[in-house]
C-alpha cells in the first residue's frame, strides 16, 4: 500500500459516473488514499446528463447493477434513466464514497513526471495536485454532436441536444421536430408521440429493432428479491441475458454464422409483422445488416411510430429556418420545438484534458490515427494511467458495469505491483501494444459493425473501435494481464 518512498500511494479517479464510482468503492475497500474529480455538481455521468423523455437503460435492470450491490427495488425489467441515476445515488450513499468526490472540479491537464513517477493533475481553477496512479473513468458518450445543418441557430423556438434537455420546451400539443434515429431518437418517439400535436421524425437511417419484453415487477416480487437474492441472480445470469451476450458476441465476430442469421431473422420477422402501411414500411426498411449499427432494443417502437401524430420524414434536410425545417424538395415542416438526437463525439474519452506522458508524448499525438488502449485499459507512453470503459472495449447491448468490473480486476493486478513496492511505474511496451492493436484492427474489420453502415462504433478511418472478439475472450484477457507485455520499472529500494 506504500510507494517506494514509504508513503501511501495516492490515486486520482477522474469522473464520478458508473465506472468512477466503482473505482472509488474498490479503493475505499482497500483503504487507499484517493480523490475522485467530477466536473459536474452531481454523480451519475451519462445518467445525470441524459434526462430526455423515454430514457431507458436497454440492459435488463437486474443485469445493470454492480455485482456486489444487487438491487431488489427495480420497478421493471428495463429501468428508466431516472431510476438508474437513483441506483447510483443509493450506491454512493451506501458505500460512503461521496466525501471522496470533489464536485465542480474539472481536470484539464495530466502531466507525467518521470523522475518522481507521478502524475500532476491540473484543475480548471488552476490548482494542481500530484498522484501516483490515475484511473480515467471519464465516460465515452458525453460530448454532444450537433448536426452541421445550415441555419440551425436561426430557429425561433427551442432547439437543443438530447443530453441538454430543455424542460420548458413545448411538447404537449406542440409541433415537434426530432432529428436522429439512434437509440435516443427512437426512445423519444415512443415517449412523446401521444403528447405532441405532431411529431416530425427526421430519419436519415432506419433501424433494425430487436423485440424485447418489458414488464413491471410487483411489490410481492420486489419483496421476494429482498428475501432471496438468488432470485435476482436467476435473472442476471439467465440464458436470456448472459446467454444472449455470448451469442451476440459470437454473432458480431462470425457474421455469416448461425447466431447472426438468427438475430437477422428475429429483426426481419419483427419488422415484417409490425408495420401495416406499405409506404411507411419502405421508409423504415434498413438497407444494411442487423447489428451493424447498435441494435435498438424495444418493446414498442414499431407500435408507437405508427401513431397518427408521427410523420417519418426521410427526405434530405436543406436548412433550418425560424419557422421550422426546410427540406431539399422545398417542403417546410413548421415546428415549435426542435430536438437534436444526433449522438455524441465518441472519440473524446478523457479529452479535452491535455495528457502528456513519457518524453512529452501527448494523448492527441498518440491517438492521431484513432483512440487505442492496450486491451482497452492501459496506454504505452502513459505509465500508471488506467482507463475504465476506454477505447476499443466491448460494445453492444450488454452491461458496461460488468465490463468495467472486469477491467478493474485487470487494473488491480497491475496496480498491485506498485502497491507492494515491487515497481514504481508500469506501462505497456510500444511493441506489445502495436502487435495487439494490429490483431485487433484486423479482427475488427471482419465484424458486423463494418458490414456497410455508419455508426458511432466506427473510428475516423472506418474501423470499428471495439473489442472484436468474444465475450469469453474478453473475460479471459481481463482475468490475468500478460506482464511480459509491460515495462515494469522496479523500485530503487
Ligand atoms: P447515435 O446512435 O449516434 O444516433 C445519432 C442519430 O442522429 C443517427 O440516427 C444519425 O443518422 C442522426 N444524425 C446525425 N447527424 C445528422 C444530420 N446531420 N442529419 C440527420 N440525421 C443526423 O446517438 P444516440 O444518442 O441515439 O445513441 C448513442 C448511444 O447512447 C446509444 O447507442 C446507446 O449506447 C446510448 P445516421 O445513422 O448517421 O444516418
Image (cartoon, rainbow, N blue to C red):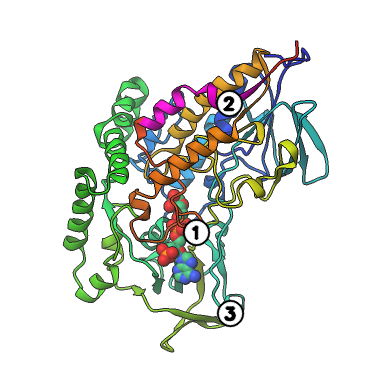
Q: Viewed as shown, does residue 452 lie left or right of 346?
A: left
Please tell me whether mark 2 sits on a helix, a strand or a loop: strand
Mark closer to the chain start, 1 or 3: 3
Task: Return the x and y of residue 456 as percentages of the image width and height.
Answer: 46, 55
Q: CA distance from mark 2 to mark 1?
A: 36 Å
Q: Is residue 89 left or right of residue 72?
A: right
Q: Quadrant of ligand 1?
A: bottom left
Check residue 20 in the rendering and tell me which mark sits there, or answer none.
Answer: none
Magenta span covers which residues? 473-489
Please give the name of the residue rendered at 37% of the width and 54% of the height, measured from the top-left corner. Answer: 450
Residue 292 image position (x, y, % from top left): 34, 55
Question: Mark 1 Cα within 10 Å, few/some/many (few <14, many 20+)?
Answer: many
- Labels 2, 1: front one: 2
Task: Name above or below for residue 319 compared with residue 295.
Answer: below
Residue placed most toward the observer, 120 or 238: 120
Helix, strand or loop at disc 1? loop
Q: Which residue sits at x=47%, y=42%?
A: 438
- Pointer 2: residues within 10 angstroms few (<14), some, or many (20+)? many
Q: Is residue 483 magenta?
A: yes
What residue would you read off at disc 1?
343
Determine the residue located farthest toward the top in the rendered image. Answer: 493
Task: Select label 2 or label 3 by which is in front.
Answer: 2
Give the residue at mark 3: 151
Amino acid at each position: 500500500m506504500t510507494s517506494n518512498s514509504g508513503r501511501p500511494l495516492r490515486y486520482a479517479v477522474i469522473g464520478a459516473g458508473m465506472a468512477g464510482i466503482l473505482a472509488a468503492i474498490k479503493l475505499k475497500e482497500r483503504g487507499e488514499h484517493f480523490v475522485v474529480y467530477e466536473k459536474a455538481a452531481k454523480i451519475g455521468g451519462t445518467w445525470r446528463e441524459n434526462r430526455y423523455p423515454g430514457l431507458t437503460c436497454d440492459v435488463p435492470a437486474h443485469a445493470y447493477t454492480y455485482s456486489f450491490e444487487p438491487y431488489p427495488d427495480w420497478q421493471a425489467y428495463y429501468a428508466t434513466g431516472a431510476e438508474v441515476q437513483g441506483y447510483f445515488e443509493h450506491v454512493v450513499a451506501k458505500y460512503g464514497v461521496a466525501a471522496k468526490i470533489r464536485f465542480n472540479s474539472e481536470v484539464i491537464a495530466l502531466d507525467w513526471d518521470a523522475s518522481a513517477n507521478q502524475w500532476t493533475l491540473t484543475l480548471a481553477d488552476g490548482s494542481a495536485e500530484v498522484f501516483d496512479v490515475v484511473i480515467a473513468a471519464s465516460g465515452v458518450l458525453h460530448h454532444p454532436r450537433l448536426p452541421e445543418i445550415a441555419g440551425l441557430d436561426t430557429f425561433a423556438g427551442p432547439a437543443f441536444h438530447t443530453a441538454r434537455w430543455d424542460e420548458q420546451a413545448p411538447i404537449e400539443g406542440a409541433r415537434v421536430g426530432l432529428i436522429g434515429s439512434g437509440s435516443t431518437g427512437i426512445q423519444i418517439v415512443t415517449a412523446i408521440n401521444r403528447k405532441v400535436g405532431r411529431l416530425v421524425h427526421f430519419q436519415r437511417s432506419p433501424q433494425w429493432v430487436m423485440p424485447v419484453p418489458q414488464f413491471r415487477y410487483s411489490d410481492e416480487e420486489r419483496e421476494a428479491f429482498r428475501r432471496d437474492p438468488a432470485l435476482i441472480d436467476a435473472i442476471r445470469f439467465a440464458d436470456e441475458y448472459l446467454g444472449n451476450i455470448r451469442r451476440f458476441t459470437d454473432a458480431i465476430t462470425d457474421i455469416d454464422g448461425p447466431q447472426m442469421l438468427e438475430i437477422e431473422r428475429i429483426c426481419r420477422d419483427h419488422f415484417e409483422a409490425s408495420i401495416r402501411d406499405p409506404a411507411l414500411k419502405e421508409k423504415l426498411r434498413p438497407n444494411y445488416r442487423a447489428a451493424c449499427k447498435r441494435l435498438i432494443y424495444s418493446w414498442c417502437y414499431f407500435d408507437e411510430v405508427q401513431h397518427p401524430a408521427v410523420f417519418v420524414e426521410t427526405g434530405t434536410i436543406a436548412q433550418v429556418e425560424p419557422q421550422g425545417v426546410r427540406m431539399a424538395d422545398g417542403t417546410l415542416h413548421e415546428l415549435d420545438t426542435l430536438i437534436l438526437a444526433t449522438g455524441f463525439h465518441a472519440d473524446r474519452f478523457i479529452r479535452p484534458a491535455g495528457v502528456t506522458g513519457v518524453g512529452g508524448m501527448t494523448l492527441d499525438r498518440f491517438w492521431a490515427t484513432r483512440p487505442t488502449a492496450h486491451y482497452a485499459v492501459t496506454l504505452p507512453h502513459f505509465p500508471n494511467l488506467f482507463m475504465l470503459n476506454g477505447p476499443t472495449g466491448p460494445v453492444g447491448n450488454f452491461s458496461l458495469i460488468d465490463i468495467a468490473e472486469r477491467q478493474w480486476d485487470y487494473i488491480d493486478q497491475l496496480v498491485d505491483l506498485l502497491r507492494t513496492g515491487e515497481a514504481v511505474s508500469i506501462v505497456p511496451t510500444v511493441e506489445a501494444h502495436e502487435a495487439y492493436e494490429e490483431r485487433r484492427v484486423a479482427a475488427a474489420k471482419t465484424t458486423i459493425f463494418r458490414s456497410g453502415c455508419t455508426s458511432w462504433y466506427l473510428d475516423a478511418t472506418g474501423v470499428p473501435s471495439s473489442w472484436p472478439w468474444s465475450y469469453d475472450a474478453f473475460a479471459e484477457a481481463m482475468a490475468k494481464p500478460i506482464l511480459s507485455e509491460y515495462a515494469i520499472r522496479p523500485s530503487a529500494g
